[in-house]
Structures are given as C-alpha cells and as structure tokens.
Image (cartoon, helix red, strand yellow):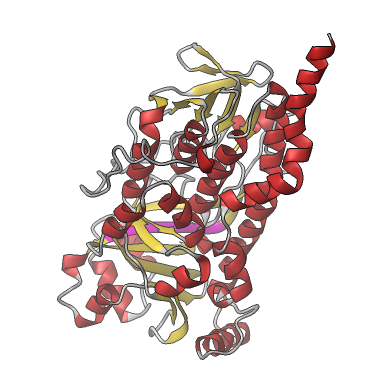
Amino acid sequence: MAMISDPQPHKPLVSADVDARADGISQKTVLYGGRKARLSLNIVIVGCGLGGLAAAHALAKAGHKVTVLEDAPAIGEVGAGIQVSPNVSKLLIRWGLGETLKKIAVLPEGIEFRRWQNGEKLGYTTWGSRMIDDYGAPYYHIHRADFHKLLYDLASPHIKLRLGSRVVSVDPSAPSCTLASGEVVHCDLLLGADGLKSIIRETVLGVPDKAVPTGDAAYRALVPVEKMINDPELKDFIDRPRMIGWIGPGRHIMTYPVRAKKEFNMVLLHPDDGSVESWQAEGSAEKMRADFRGWDPKIQKLLEMVPSTLKWKLMDRKPLHTWVHPSGKVALLGDACHPMLPYRAQGAAMAIEDGAVLGNLFSRLSHPRQIKPLLYAFELLRLPRTAQVQGSSSLNQKIFHLPDGPEQLQRDKEMKQAMNGEAGLGNPNQWADTKKSAELFGYDADKAVDEWWAERGEREIGRLASESMMERAKL
C-alpha cells in the first residue's frame, strides 16, 4: 500500500477468502538452491503492498533481517481483481503457492476483444493450458485481497512489520528514516516500496518527480456471480471464464471472474473528470452507468448489478534515469520507480519480479563492498524491462480508445486476422503477438539473475569479497 492521503471517501479494506492461506508454507520452501547471504543485512522496506511483501519475503529467505514500515494502521487490500501472468505465477509456485492458487484463482481460457456498441467479437487469443505449455506456468485471475494475504503469509514469519509508521524524511547516507512520531529508524539498506506517491523516490532522485495526467480515469467494481447466473448471456462469462475487453472511442472495459468464479471483476476506463490518484477513492455507480450508456446491452445488464465502485485517476510517469541513490544505501522498487498504467495488467507483476531479483542478488552478499554494486545490478536487470512494459501499456491506451473511423476499422481488421490464425507479430492485440508474449510471459526473474551472475556478476561483484580479504591480509 502506498502512503496516500487525500480527502476523498475511501472504501474499507476487504477480507481475504477463507482459502487464501499460506500459513507455514515459507518455512518449508528452499530458494536459491539453499544459498544464504554470508553477510546478513538489517534491511528496512517502506511499504507493505504486493511489491514490498514480495521483496521482504525474498530478502528474508536470502538470509537478511527485514523490517517493513507501513503507514496504514491495518494491512489489506480493496475489493478488486488482479491478473497473475506466467512471469509471476512461476515465482509464486516456486515460493510454495501452487496448490493454493489452484483453489482460489481462476484459470482463464483466453482474452477476447469486442466492439463497444454491439459486442461483436474482434479478437481472441487462447490462454488456458497453452500458457503452461508455452511459458512454463499458468495465467491466473485473482482477488487483490487474496493475493495480498498470500504474500503476507509468506513474509510474516520471517520479518518485523510495523504498522502506523509513516516515514516523513530520509537520510540516505546513514541510511535511516524518520517517522512522524520522531523516531529515527536505522538500517544497512533502505528500500522504497512506497508506491505512486513515494517519499523515498524524491530522496533517490534529489528532486520532486511529478506525474503527468493520462487524461483517463478508471472505475473498479465487483459483481456477485449469483446475480449473473440466471441470465444465459451473462452466465457464459462465468461458465467459460476469460478476460473480455470491450473497446470503443475514448473508453474501454475489461472483465473477468475471480475467487473461484464467485465474483466478476470489472475495470472501466474513461476520460477523467476530476478523479484522484488513489486506489481506494469511492466513485459513483450511477455516474459510472451514465459514462457507459449506449454500450453493448450485456454491459448495461452488468452495470445494473454493480452495487458500488472505486474510481481513480490514471497518472503516467516516464522511466526514471536511476533507482539507486548515489550513497548506494537506498533504492526503489515497484510503483515507486516504475508505476504501470493498467492497460497491460503488469503493475503488480513487475513489482513482484523486482522483489524476486533483489532476493536472488542479495543471497550472494558476503561483504559490505558488494552492497552498492548489487543495487546497480538490480537496476541494470530491471529498469530496461520495466521501461519496455511501461511503453507497451501506454500503447494499449491508444489502441483501445481509437475513435470510430478508418484507424479503428484497420485495427479491427488486424485483430480479426490474428484471431483467424494469421501472423500476430505487431498485431494491435498485443497478446496475439507471440514475440511480445514470449518476452513478457517467458521471463523468469531467478533465471535472469543466475544467467547474469554467471556472465558478469561473479567476475565483477563476487571478486570484491576476496579482494577485500587479500587487502586485509597485507596489513
């Protein structure tokens, strides 16, 4: 959860599903081939969101002492769905969550695009078991609260969590951070996982980093499935679970079932009309229905079933030039350094990959001289990938929201061609582009670190410990 404060009314945190439990699992898993850091650091992570918890779990399993500082008085998530693509599910399975995910998540058959007015099918890409065959792990849809609870269960036995701990300033040379209470928290390494409005980001960059409005805002809503199953048209969305996107002028809608098909998630993108940059601000269900009046009759049915909605302003931030403070003692991860627009559904995925890479890299730590170069190795491994995904996400905003006309007709034609088996490379349905999918979903964070370490890391960073020992021996 980011450290966000605004005057808007907020929805309460949602309880996790009773089956969203991972108690005791992380004590049984072995990561990094059993390798633990020979030098154990005192690491402070600011932010207890998905990325912060993933990093806390991975770094604790690597042998470090981890404290997580969270501004909020309680932990949890709002009611909304989230996508767990193969690049993340392979990590979660490695972390011991495979069987739990099968219980609480939904395995979608594919992704489908429809025309906004009448629901005409424009594009389709098969997922299901093909994701496992092609990329080594499944594609899941899950509830955010359930996902957060699973990561919390993994991390909590190994970390110290301090709630109600708002960071107000940072000393990057110590490193340390000062809380609103006046307490100064010291550590060996400080990591900012404090989200979109990160205070750690300003410390790393040395200047404020202002977001740029995209012109879009988003509603999020959950429809109880029992309301849908008596309508044959809507029941199909549950019986054949898939991600369905309706695309139209200046707007689009994405839908999919979550919680073992007990709830139906909806995300509705529209021109911004005064929203706030917060995941938890409550919106008007009536205004949402008005914003999508005239869309596919199936959408009208669904919107009538929505009891309440969340609404947030979509802001864009260009890729940063660095994630690491020059002191080599403070770094960023997740939304604090690469916030993702939701058009590619990779925000949480990139943050969790960050945590996995940090854990793997710092499992190799054996000398203080290695801390700074390991942080720059993290940046080297992660910044180009996240920047590419940020660009891919922004591209979908343009593709999905084309006004009706020649460009829209060409987009629809190309999507249909890919659906009918013609080459998908460069297709406006980016999920049909096999090259892009291989790059995105085929990625393995641990494998990326292992390969880099074998090619460069051992030579450039591993030797620092032995050199230091030799220097001491000469004294």
| Residue 137 shown left or right of residue 175 in the figure | left
The vertical placement of 293 against 70, above or below, is below
- Tell me, yes or no, whether the highlighted magenta stretch contains residue 218: yes
Q: Tell me the residue at 43%/22% (across/down).
A: 165
Q: Main secondary structure of the magenta part?
A: strand
- Tell me, yes or no, whether the highlighted magenta stretch contains residue 51: no
Chain part drawn in magenta:
215-222
| Residue 292 shown left or right of residue 18 in the figure | right
Residue 127 visible? The answer is no
The image shows residue 334 at horizontal and vertical percentages of 55, 43
> Which quadrant of the figure contains the C terminus?
top right
Instruction: Using the image as rendered, state which of residue 56 and residue 172 is in the foreground.
Output: 56
Instruction: Using the image as rendered, state which of residue 197 and residue 460 is in the foreground.
Output: 460
> Which quadrant of the figure contains the N terminus?
top left
The image shows residue 64 at horizontal and vertical percentages of 52, 26
Q: Which residue in the rendered view is the most extreme toward the right?
A: 474
Residue 247 visible? The answer is yes
The image shows residue 122 at horizontal and vertical percentages of 47, 85
Instruction: Using the image as rendered, state which of residue 418 and residue 127 is in the foreground.
Output: 127
| Residue 469 shown left or right of residue 60 in the figure | right
The image shows residue 138 at horizontal and vertical percentages of 42, 64
The vertical placement of 87 against 466, above or below, is below
Total marks shown come to: 0
Q: Tell me the residue at 58%/43% (across/down).
A: 357
Q: Tell me the residue at 44%/39% (across/down).
A: 49
